[in-house]
Amino acid sequence: MAGSVQVTPGFQLQPSAEQTPLATNYITNFDFLNQYLPDTYEKEFERYGNRTVSSFLRMVGAEMPSNSDLIKWVEQGRLHTKYTNVNADSAAAANTATFTVNDLLVPTGSVTTGGTGGIAIRTGQTVFITSNTVGAGSNKAIVTDVRYTGVNSPEFDVAYYEGTGQAFALNDTVTVMIYGSEFRKGTNGMVESLEADSEIFETSPIILKDKYAVNGSDMAQIGWVEVTTENGATGYLWYLKSEHETRLRFDDYLETSMLEAVPAAAGSGAATQAVNTTVGNKGTEGIFYTINDRGNVWSGGIPTALADFDSIISRLDKQGAIEENVIFVNRDFGFAIDDMLAAQNSYGAGGTSYGLFDNDEQMALNLGFTGFRRGYDFYKSDWKYLNDPTMRGGLTNGGINGMMVPAGSTTVYDQVLGKNAKRPFLHVRYRASETEDRRYKTWITGSAGGAMTSDLDAMEVNYLSERAVCTMGANNFFLFED
């Protein structure tokens, strides 16, 4: 029986003699058996640009080791004291008066008497007393006696310098400020001494982990792709591209966890959960939590006028009065500052100047500002973390428009070193010793990819870090909440 060539498989293409695009020579099957292969882009297209959101702490802080589960530091209290909730126990026009102090814990960080409890007012000191009622009057007086204990304690007696006596009414609420002292010739010194009031703060590190895994079979099928990564690396990657992205994601989490972390409250679900004994249960004090707890918060939108910034500056005057500050902003906050500053220009409404005094038709108009000075220096910087739609960008509730960070460093008493030390206002402490560094650990396990640690037919890349952030002088920070 005569043989014959079967009909299938037939010719997939009919090449033309000339380079003419025809329906018969158009390749639709991306198969390597095809005679003609299509042009392909082997370089990965970066349609989202730089996808990482970290770098904030690298710009404003530092990292330093710690060898303990607990990090403690001491911050200075106020040098002077003013009581704002004091009751006037004497009638108007009296030459002498008695006052009861009701706000022993206000303001936080005030100086208190050593060994007596009570208040920082002492016999012989001169005080300024003013009513909290508008128009009710004020007096200058000298303290003649102080009772730190007793039924209405603490209370003190004064004698007024003014001949007209007490300017305000009985039971009026007044504010008392100490401004000096006065003693007669040949007398003994001050009776009581003052101990500096310091506040002790503490935080503890948390352990962060991540992992990338690929099985040995997939490692044997190599597919190359050219990439340019967020950290500046370029070249060809195969299966380790996913490992590289895992590393970048972990790098971001190292920073965002320091921003967002909160301590687990006593009795909370996180503190008491026992279903999964491997997950953490204590939390740590992140930057946002700390500023909300003992810093300054602007709530209800974005400050859009100089009057808004004047109220912010007034608050800074009452705190550390740091000369230079950086405001990290989202896009809306950045535009609001630009518009506010542009409106100060006499030609701002027409959009023609914005401070460029030699404009011509060839010069691009700069509609943005990098900073301004009003009492203090404020520098503006865009913060990608607040704009990224996969992170803080576009949140309906709990949104943050920006954060103001003081520049420079502060002096605190480091309880580990046992002495005063200068520290950046923001810095990260990571667990480390002479034999173990947990700042950024990575290791490979399994039986593939060169690892020979177990019988698992895969390569696992593990990541670990143990760290905490220290927000020192939180009273100098501002958080701008939505």
Image (cartoon, rainbow, N blue to C red):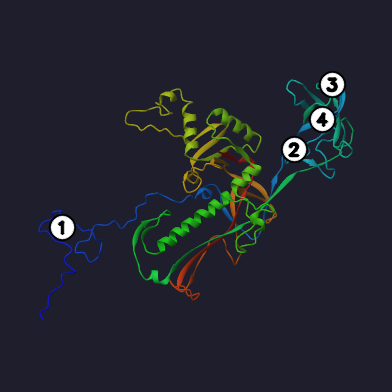
The residue tagged 3 is 92
Relative height, residue 165 to residue 435 (above, below): above
Q: Which amino acid does label 2 sit on?
A: Val
Instruction: Give percent across and percent down for residue 43.
Output: 32, 56
List the residue tagged with mark 4: 87
- The amino acid pointed to by label 4 is Asn
Whether residue 123 is visible, yes or no, is no
Q: Disc number at residue 382? A: none
The CA distance from mark 4 to mark 1 is 99 Å
Q: Residue furthest bottom?
A: 1
Q: Is residue 142 above or below residue 79?
A: above
Alpha carbons under labels 3 and 4: distance apart = 13 Å
CA–CA distance in space, label 2 to label 1: 88 Å
Q: Which circle marks residue 106 in the picture?
A: 2
In which image quadrant can residue 121 be found? top right
Residue wearing tag 1: 24
Q: Which residue lies furthest to the top in this view?
A: 164
Across and down, in percent, residue 302 comes to 54, 34
Task: Tell me if I can see residue 222 in this picture.
Answer: yes
Disc 3 is placed on an element classified as loop
For residue 113, above or below residue 416: above
Q: Which of marks 2 and 1 is nearer the N terminus?
A: 1
- Residue drawn at the location 57% of the way across and 62% of the way down: 438
Look at label 3 and name its amino acid: Ala
* Type of amino acid under label 1: Thr
How far apart marks 3 and 2 lie (CA) works out to 26 Å
